[in-house]
Image (cartoon, rainbow, N blue to C red):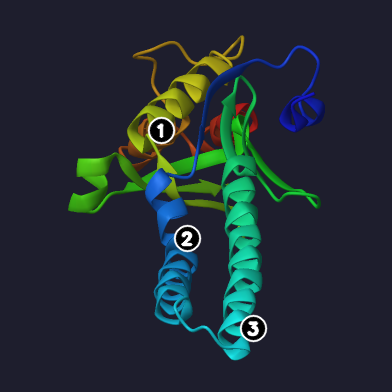
Amino acid sequence: MDYIRRVLLEDEQILVRTRLHWLSLLGGLGKEILVLVALVAGYLAVRFLADEKGVYVAVGFGAIAIVVLLSASVDVVRWRSTQFIVTDRRVVSCRGIMSKEVLDSSLSKINDVLLRQSWVGRVFDFGTIEILTASDTGINLMSGIARPIEFKQALLKAKAAFEPGPAAGAAAPGAPTATQLLEELAALKSRGMISDAEYQQKRSEILRRM
């Protein structure tokens, strides 16, 4: 069973799912690739040695190559296990192979979504998404994410759909706000059209309705 499904609620729907861009994987495999190239070159250099020392060197190269291949396999699995998800309730980033690290941000607490793309990122369709939440330390940073524009659009649409409509009894569009009412009340008092007692009474009523 997909691990991410286990951390979601039963009726929670996944709207978009992506992972790190393949260039991030290639960057992580760069060292392994260079080592393998060096090992192949070293093997070709000693393969024609007929003495016993040449055999030992070739075996040593082979053992190192196996270790490097295992390391590369771990990088691939780690890349595949890193996922970024938008649901109808939250944004989730999941990392780790055996030990999992899951960070989620509720749609209701997201204040801003920042997208950064270099010109290379625009060409290959990757970037960084930074989600700022209501908490001072609530930052969900997703670097090197694939399809960042699609991810941000899905996030904003989910947030707009998740947010409740105007509460019952809220001021209708075009109705004066409490601040406007207080300003008008102060203007009436300054013109002498209402007494100090009436001003204080009306002011208290407006403040209670805020």
Q: Is residue 198 left or right of residue 127?
A: right
Q: Quadrant of residue 94?
A: top right
Residue 173 position within the rendered picture, expressed as x and y whole percent measured from the top left: 38, 12
Q: Which residue in the protein does label 3 denote?
A: 56
Q: Nearer the viewer, residue 56 or 92?
A: 56
Mark carried by residue 95: none
Nearer the N terminus, badge 2 or badge 1? 2
- Residue 138 appears in the picture as rendered: no
**Circle 1 sits in a helix, a strand or a loop, which is it?**
helix
Disc 2/disc 1 C-alpha distance (Å): 28 Å
Q: Is residue 196 above or below residue 38?
A: above
**What number is the disc on residue 29?**
2
Q: Amino acid at mark 2?
A: Leu
Q: Secondary structure at mark 2?
A: helix
Q: How many marks?
A: 3
Quick one: SS at disc 3? helix
Could you classify mark 1 by the number of other residues whose Cα lies within 10 Å: few (under 14), some (14-19), or many (20 or more)? Answer: some
Looking at the image, residue 24 lies above or below residue 192: below
